[in-house]
Amino acid sequence: EVQLVESGGGLVKPGGSLRLSCAASGFTFSSYSMNWVRQAPGKGLEWVSSISSSSSYIYYADSVKGRFTISRDNAKNSLYLQMNSLRAEDTAVYYCARARIAVAGTGVFDYWGQGTLVTVSS
Amino acid sequence: DIQMTQSPSSLSASVGDRVTITCQASQDISNYLNWYQQKPGKAPKLLIYDASNLETGVPSRFSGSGSGTDFTFTISSLQPEDIATYYCQQYDNLPTFGQGTRLEIK
C-alpha cells in the first residue's frame, strides 16, 4: 500500500524557517517524481514545487522561488521542503504528492499524504 | 502560467441528479487534464486523469471529457457521499489547479 506521511509543520514567526518531511512507503520511491502542493485555509490547491526521480530537475512556483528548497533522499525514501523567509501568506496545509512519472514539473498526482499545517504568525 | 477557470464555483443538487462541472484552460493543453475530489479535512483524491480516464477503483458514475481548452466533469447520478470540492488540474506545463467547485446536496 502506498503511503505518504508528512511531518514538520507548526507555528513559526514571519521571517523564520521550517523544514517539512514526507516519508514514503509501499512503492519504489526512486522511480517517481514528487511534489509539494499547499492549501491555504479555506482556499484552493496551489502547486509549490516538484523534483524529478533522480533530483536532476527541480521546479518552483513563482510565489516560493528563492525562499523554498525541495530535496529528496532516495536511500531514505524521503522528500523534504526547506522553507525560509516565511511569510503570513505561506500559512497552509502542505501536502506531498506522488506524480505518476519520473519527470518533474508535470504529471498526474495519484497519491497524496494527509498534509501538515504550517502557520506563519507573530 | 496556464490559467484554469472552473465553473461553477459552487453547486447544489439533489441525490440522483446529473452534475456537470466545466474547466477552461487559458491555452491548448491537449488532454493533460486531471480531476480531483477533496472532502473536508482530507487530502485530494484522483478521480479522472488525462481528461477522460477513470482512475482504478473510482465509481463509474464519474466521467470526464474534452481536449484542447474545454473540459467537462460529470457525475451521472449524484450520491450523498459525493459531497466534496472538485478541482481540475492541468499538467501541460507546470501544474496549475482550477479554483474548485463546492458541491452540496439540495
Image (cartoon, rainbow, N blue to C red):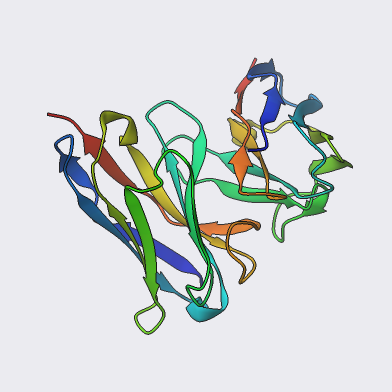
Q: Say if residue B93 shows up in the picture.
A: yes
**Relative depth, front residue between B22 and B15:** B22
Report the residue at 81% width, 27% height from top: B18
Q: Which percent across, then down, holds residue B60?
A: 80, 48
Q: Residue at x 41, y 38 (%)?
A: B41
In this orientation, does residue A23 appear? no
Q: Is residue B14 left or right of residue B85?
A: right
| Quadrant of the rendering where the C terminus of chain B is positioned | top right
State which quarter of the image contains the N terminus of chain B: top right
Work out whether B26 lies above or below B37: above
Residue that sits furthest to the front in the current view: A66
Figure disc tally: 0
- Could you tell me residue B28's position as x and y percent? 82, 40
**Residue A40 location (% of width, % of height):** 39, 32
Q: Is residue B42 left or right of residue B20?
A: left
Which residue ends up furthest to the bottom in the rendered image? A75
The quadrant in which residue B99 appears is: top right
Query: Residue B24 at what x, y percent from top left?
Result: 77, 30
Q: Nearer the viewer, residue A45 or A50?
A: A50
Please tell me which residue is depicted at 66% across the width and 18% down the height of the picture: B11
In this view of the protein, which residue sits in the foreground, B71 or A56? Answer: A56
Please give left or right for residue A43 compared with residue B37 in the image.
left
State which quadrant residue B67 falls in: top right
